[in-house]
Amino acid sequence: MIFELMTALTVGALMFGTGLYGALSQTNLVMIIMGVELILAAALVNLVAFWRYLHPDEPAAQMFVLIVMLVMAVEMTVGFGIAIARFRSRGSVEMEEARELKG
Amino acid sequence: MTGMTAQMIFLAFFGGAAVWFGIVVFRTHSMVRSAIALLFSQTAVGLMFLLMQAEFLGVLQIMMMATEMSVMAVFMVMFMMDPGGMGAMEMTHQKRLSLWAGGVGLVAALAVIWLADWGPVVPNIPGAAQQAADLGRELLGRSMLIFESAGLTILTAMVAATMVAIAPTKERRK
């Protein structure tokens, strides 16, 4: 049964690697948000796998999953709020054109 | 074929689908296809949850992500210069660094997964109704403060994001 745990964790690792590549390589804000969503989905897979195979009697583990889902929703809300503001002021959400944010 | 073996095969299948659609997100030039690929990836993750007998979380994941990704597809069409991908625009930078970072992250995670001692695996879990009842008691008991803080956080984020997104009026511009 340990192999089911390993399979789920390996899927999580692959999603994490893909999401990290996407978040770093994309120039568009919405695509960067997609990369971060993949990273958080990887965290979700790991949390559910840990709950199912190691601590199924602990409901607090499911609570962590709900918190990560909340982080995904908040990240999208704030990201799209910034995207709209940026699009209104500059007409683009390309991060290559946002160098002035460096200060 | 035992039940557990079937579970592993389906976990690998849906996991493979989740990873494959995750890769498609960054490979296609069409932004709408990217959003739909992410929707499929997140749905496959939800199906993995169902396979791992987390019924409530699986259904929640599929419902939440279907809504989120539909909204994302709308934003893609609104904000992208070439949402259909017909112009095959290059929208990446620092590709080599990103590949290295993703690769190193993946190898490090795989090393931890395959080298760590995870201890004994528990074969039996509570039924779906018992899980939901336990989670409800957890949310309204020991974790109530965290749960309430989470609700307040998302409300604050919604209000703040709406305020940031509202077009400035003439008075505010002055």
Image (cartoon, coloured by chain):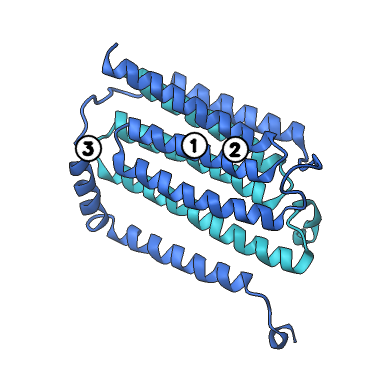
Chain colours: A cyan, B blue
Q: Position of residue A74 (x, y in %)?
A: 50, 57
Q: Residues within 10 Å of mark 3 (few under 14, many from 20)?
A: some
Residue in view at x 64 percent, y 27 percent: B103
Q: Position of residue B141 (x, y in %)?
A: 22, 57
Disc nearer the start of the sequence (3/2): 2
Amino acid of disc 2: Gly
- The quarter of the picture where the C terminus of chain B appears is bottom right
Disc nearer the start of the sequence (3/1): 1
Amino acid of disc 3: Asp
Chain letter of the residue beneath label 3 in the structure image? A
Q: Residues within 10 Å of mark 2 (few under 14, many from 20)?
A: many
Q: Position of residue A68 (x, y in %)?
A: 44, 48
Q: Which residue is mark 3?
A: A57
Between the C-alphas of marks 3 and 1, the distance is: 22 Å
- Residue B117 in sight: no
Q: Residue furthest top?
A: B1
| Residue A102: quarter of image | bottom right
